Image (cartoon, rainbow, N blue to C red):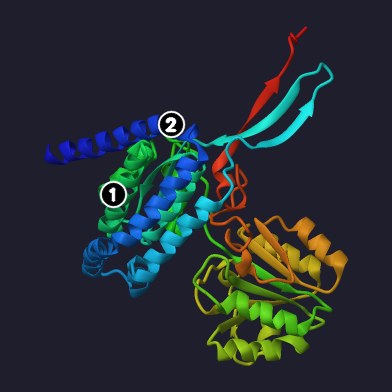
Amino acid sequence: MGELRYYMTIESTIIEMAKAAKKAAVAMARCPSDRKNEVLLNIAEKLEADAAHIKAENAKDIVFAREKGLSNAMIDRLTIKDATIASMAQGLREVAQLEDPLGAIVKTWRRPNGLEVSRMRIPLGVIGIIYESRPNVTVDAAGLCFKAGNAVILRGGSEALNSNQALAGIISAALKETGLPEKAVQVVPMREREAVNVLLRQEESIDLIIPRGGESLIRFVVENSKIPVLKHYKGVCHVYVDDGADIEMAKEICLNAKVQRPGVCNAMETLLVHKLIAWDFLPEMGKRFADARVEIRGCPETCHILSNAKEATEADWAAEYLDLILAVKVVNNMDEAIRHIQTYGSDHTEAIVTSDYERARRFVREVDSSVVLVNASTRFNDGGQLGLGAEIGISTSKLHAFGPMGVEELTTTKFVVFGDGQVRS
């Protein structure tokens, strides 16, 4: 009986949060840009002023995480330092500087009957974001959703509850001071996973769910949600080094793509090399990877060229290692490289290194990942790097956004039609 009563408390709490967010979204949709920017800057100031309180609450989460046996890597992501707070504040200030997408006319045309038809940007409404570990996502996501005129419900990892509650309190105070609805940004105040299940059933109040985290979390959300989900399961990113590529350029690109931050979704996981340059490229490239402690898992030809390479299995071609491990395959031509990407890729990020303009054009045309690069590292698939100012995540589903999602991708468009008395016959 007690469990049932507690479940009903979770359910009623989430339902009320969703209803309040839907109501707040109406106010947010008509909020002027200067007031939104005022709130964002106010939150940034409060984060810096309340740094001691935030870190004290975060320390409670770290104790909890250690008791749960979380890995050092997870605890590192969970930890809020002075630099973390400074970065969150700076991110909000940058979002405040972005152009407000709402009300922008995307396209206008006139019909033969004189009707003037336009498409205007509007908010999505209420966005639910489900994520793991990093408390900074609470502020980053809230800022972007808020700038785009949306209300947002945030459900962070259970291990970050105290940190997220502290951050939510700061955001609520800034909203209240500016006269905007405090429920425009809400954090789910409970650790139980059942809260996520209930949240995913609020299709009447929530318009979109964005999960951020590991593949298991994202698959759980997709399988249980009644609400549309923007997702990417994993980043199996490729770099193809073409025949005739600038070898020195290729070495720098490949090293950066794999080594700079191997644990992120836009790091290279598979290197494809044209057979005509494999003997010129791989020995020196292999030495650079070895110096960076990268383990090579290669096809038979790669293992023949690189004595320290391990033989790759079928599972390696679809693997997202998120580590200093790299699959390497020598291919006969670009056709084989593209087929390999289409077979094993995850629609995330692909790059070609080539000196042939026509091959570059063909690669861009035939490879349908969210970001396709020519002569540049896969690490550039990032909202900030691509000029979006900031991002809420990278979508590998094509509805309604594909690739890094900035403020504009947190909106949709409606049709606006002007006439002068036209009636349909």
Which circle's residue, 2 or 1, is located before the other in the chain? 2
Q: Name the residue under label 1.
A: 169
Quick check: can you spot residue 219?
no
Residue 365 numbered mark, or none = none
In the rendered image, residue 384, in percent from the top left (x then y), is placed at: 57, 61
Q: Name the residue under label 2.
A: 27
In the rendered image, residue 168, in percent from the top left (x then y), is placed at: 31, 50
424 lies left or right of 8: right
Secondary structure beneath label 1: helix
In the rendered image, residue 340, in percent from the top left (x then y), is placed at: 70, 65
Looking at the picture, does residue 318 appear above or below residue 245?
above
Instruction: State the quadrant of the C terminus.
Output: top right
Give the CA distance from mark 2 to mark 1.
20 Å
Looking at the picture, does residue 250 appear above or below residue 384?
below
Instruction: State the quadrant of the N terminus.
Output: top left
User: Quarter-wise, where is residue 121 in the image?
Assistant: top right
Image point 45% across, 35% down: which residue? 28
Image point 38% across, 51% down: which residue? 42
Quick check: can you spot residue 57?
yes
Crowd tier of the residue under label 1, counting other residues whose Cα lies within 10 Å: few below 14, some 14–19, many 20 or above: some
Looking at the picture, does residue 273 appear above or below residue 290?
above
Secondary structure beneath label 2: helix
Q: What residue type is labelled 1?
A: Gly
Crowd tier of the residue under label 2, counting other residues whose Cα lies within 10 Å: few below 14, some 14–19, many 20 or above: some
Image point 49% across, 42% down: which residue? 34
Image point 26% across, 51% down: which residue? 191
320 lies left or right of 363: left
User: Quarter-wise, where is residue 277 in the image?
Assistant: bottom right
Between 311 and 49, the residue placed more toward the observer is 49
